[in-house]
Amino acid sequence: MGANDPNEYIRLSCAEFSETLASKAPTPGGGGASALIGALGASLGAMVGNLTLGKAKYAGVRDDIEDLLSRAERLRARLLRLVGEDALSFAPLAKAYGLPSGTDAEKKVKAETLEAALKIACDVPLAIMRACCDVFDLNEE
């Protein structure tokens, strides 16, 4: 299993994802797991909205519930995409860690490559954190 297909991990069963996460494979990792949990949180918020929608007691807030459901779906889909994006963004970093560092020149190349790869690899986890915060806010609402 590799990180070439950004949808690869979200097509796995829960058990398969968990097994792969527990393995020594570099991906999926904490970012992908966090994104998946965030997507599940958005799904639970949508479940509450769907259970509320259509009940006479909540007719006055129907438009609000529909808006919340729409936002929950966008967040759920975004977080699922981020599961794969996290794996893709980590691949260059994993390769950089394997670069040789025997000579001063190799050490310099490795350090520069690691720095660039770390910057790229940090972008997706930050996006995951922001999206998860949006899920919290949405579910609170």
Image (cartoon, rainbow, N blue to C red):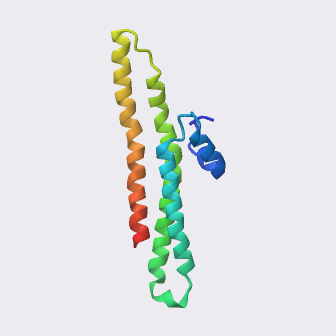
34 is higher (above) or lower (below) than 20: below
Q: Quadrant of the N terminus?
A: top right
Q: Position of residue 111 (x, y in %)?
A: 34, 22
Q: Residue at coordinates 49% horizontally, 76% vertically from top-left?
A: 66
Q: Which residue is most to the bottom?
A: 56
Residue 54 or residue 23, whichever sits in front: 23
Task: State which quadrant residue 130 falls in.
Answer: bottom left
Q: Residue at coordinates 40% horizontally, 31% vertically from top-left?
A: 117
Q: Residue at coordinates 47% horizontally, 21% vertically from top-left?
A: 98
Q: Which residue is most to the front?
A: 22
Numbered-mark total: 0
Q: Residue at coordinates 44% horizontally, 78% vertically from top-left?
A: 64
Horizontal placement of 97 versus 14: left or right?
A: left
Q: Position of residue 77 (x, y in %)?
A: 52, 57
74 is higher (above) or lower (below) than 8: below
Residue 14 or residue 123, whichever sits in front: 14
Q: Position of residue 65 (x, y in %)?
A: 47, 77
Q: Position of residue 42 (x, y in %)?
A: 50, 63
Q: Quadrant of the C terminus?
A: bottom left
